[in-house]
Amino acid sequence: MSDSTLIVLRRRGLLKAWNTDPAATIARLRAEVVGQPGRWADLFALAELSYFEGEAHGSRDEFLAAALYAYAYLAPGAAEADQPSPYDERFRQACDIYNLGLTAAFGPADKRPVQIIPQRRTLPFGAIDVAVDQKQLQWHGHELASFVPTATLAVSGLQNIYRDPGLGEPMAALPKGGAISSKGFQVAPRLRIPTNMMLVLDDPRRQIAQSELQGRLVVSTILDQPDVQLGQETVPLEYDQTAARAVSMVEAAAWQKEYSGFLNGRLFERAPTQLVAIEPHEFGRMPVILIHGTASSPFRWTDMVNDLLEVPAIRDHFEFWLFSYASGNPIPYSAIQLRASIQQALAQLGGVQADPALGRITLIGHSQGGLLAKMLVINPGDDLWNRISKRPLSSLKLTPKSRKLLRETLFPKPVPEIQRVIFIATPQRGSYVAAFSITHLIGRLVTLPLAVSEASKELVTGNGANVILGQSVLRLGSVYGMSPNSPFIRSLSAIPVAPGVHVHSIIPVATSGPLAEGSDGVVRYSSAHIAGVDSELVVHSSHSTQSNPATIAEVQRILLLQLAASPASVAAAP
């Protein structure tokens, strides 16, 4: 119990009574305090004592009373000008009592999501009718539902826990209907939105003295409303950003598909899209597309995104899109899936004509993901094709479907909207691990997409003397493609990035000794290093460096560089 509440009990001769009959003590203090001019400060004592009673008995009615007393303490009525000083220690404590009181009062005992519905709730001194405007639950055309309280959640597995302190119950809400779009581009279907719920009373200090109260639940999201008007003051709302992201991770459980996504090349072919955003696109925000590596998933970027979104300039001017793919598939095949996903997304959003910021895309690829990114910013002509065939594509015996697939995969063109690429731990000249016999054995377990299998068989069976594949179509998989001896990786490493595209390298090195001999355990420095980049940063880290603070700081620096180089019309939005 706070000193201020102890003083209230002592001065009113109620300390002994509190120890023997808390409920009667609260009732007596209420009779002496509420509705009495000049005694509004003692509402804090009522709030704290009611919260103790709620904890002692698990009483949702007492928790709700605590929240209402705290709100009346914090918010002067229409006829009162006095308001507690934010420097008063009771002010912050009252905010906590209000927030946690709401969490305990509206959170069902069985831990199901909070129901945002009109309701009548009992109180130790009466009842309150709670209204809800259902229109406020609409978010970008979807109804928000499944509100999970986050104030009392413990989050582990993420390096940094971010919370915007303020007033109200922080929650994580789920848009009904799943994806914002069913084709090409969507907001992640299991993404939880950081949400805030306030129980608001008009003229609360007058109402708290009555037995029948009227209130309303006000729901806001971190993307739309960061603060609220409380009396004569603008008060920030409390949000648990990291907790909401953690709930999304637990519910989506995408990391469980990391190895199945490597072995089953057909895993994502039934998915409505492979490219998802963590929030709807807003005009003026530049896309940052994150591409994971082998036997991995988009959730490996969580720490980086969690940190970057706390940088106001990045949060206001960039948005993050995540690409999922079957990482055991041939690299050129995964690259055309990435290309198609980006083109569909841009078309769906209206393209550069609708928003110039869509023409300033940054690709960030980790490990194999960096090779996919490179395939979108090169103009190889027939260099890639000549590595596997002795004759032009047009002269080989192929079905139209297979010929089209080979043309798309091995004769790529730069995507004009991509202006910057960040390679992280990328095996530009192959990975020595990919050359191990055990790795090749694992590679043989990969099930390739039907289109790839059919095209490769046609190449080998109908044109065997003219292609350089041997008799094993399995050599098309990503494991073989990343071997230092692979014709594909040798050809790709020799092809420069198209002019006008800014290139940055982040290279982890976990070993000591000369840098030229360094390695992250998967990729050697000599493989990841390429000449002619805008910048190169070597960080002391293992291969999975996406959560390394130095790596995240470098990505932040590069994105701010992108923002500084953007036209004023883009940099000024939104």
Image (cartoon, rainbow, N blue to C red):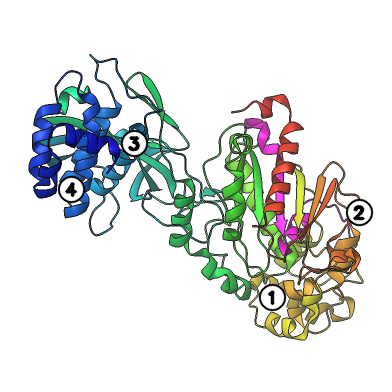
Q: Secondary structure at mark 1?
A: helix
Q: Is residue 188 left or right of residue 228?
A: right
Nearer the N terminus, badge 2 or badge 1? 1
Q: Position of residue 449 (x, y in %)?
A: 64, 71
Give the residue at mark 1. 453
Q: Is residue 417 visible?
A: no
Crowd rating for badge 1 (residues with CA inside 10 Å; few <14, some 14–19, many 20+):
some
Q: Is residue 59 above or below residue 366?
A: above
Q: CA distance from mark 1 to mark 4?
A: 68 Å
Q: CA distance from mark 3 to mark 1?
A: 62 Å
> Image quadrant for the C terminus?
top right
Q: Quadrant of residue 238?
A: top left
Q: CA distance from mark 2 to mark 1?
A: 36 Å
User: Which mark is nearer the camera, 3 or 2?
Assistant: 3
Nearer the N terminus, badge 3 or badge 2? 3
Of 267 and 146, the residue lying toward us: 146
Crowd rating for badge 4 (residues with CA inside 10 Å; few <14, some 14–19, many 20+):
some
Q: Secondary structure at mark 3?
A: helix
Q: Quadrant of residue 220?
A: top left
The amino acid type found where label 4 is placed reads Glu
Nearer the N terminus, badge 4 or badge 3? 4
Q: Is residue 220 left or right of residue 110?
A: right
The amino acid type found where label 2 is placed reads Ala
Q: Secondary structure at mark 2?
A: loop
> CB atoms at circles 3 and 2 under 8 Å apart?
no
Give the residue at mark 3. 95
Q: Which residues are magenta?
A: 353-382
User: Which mark is nearer the camera, 3 or 1?
Assistant: 3
Give the residue at mark 4. 53
Nearer the N terminus, badge 3 or badge 1? 3
User: Which mark is nearer the camera, 4 or 3?
Assistant: 4
> CB atoms at circles 2 and 4 under 8 Å apart?
no
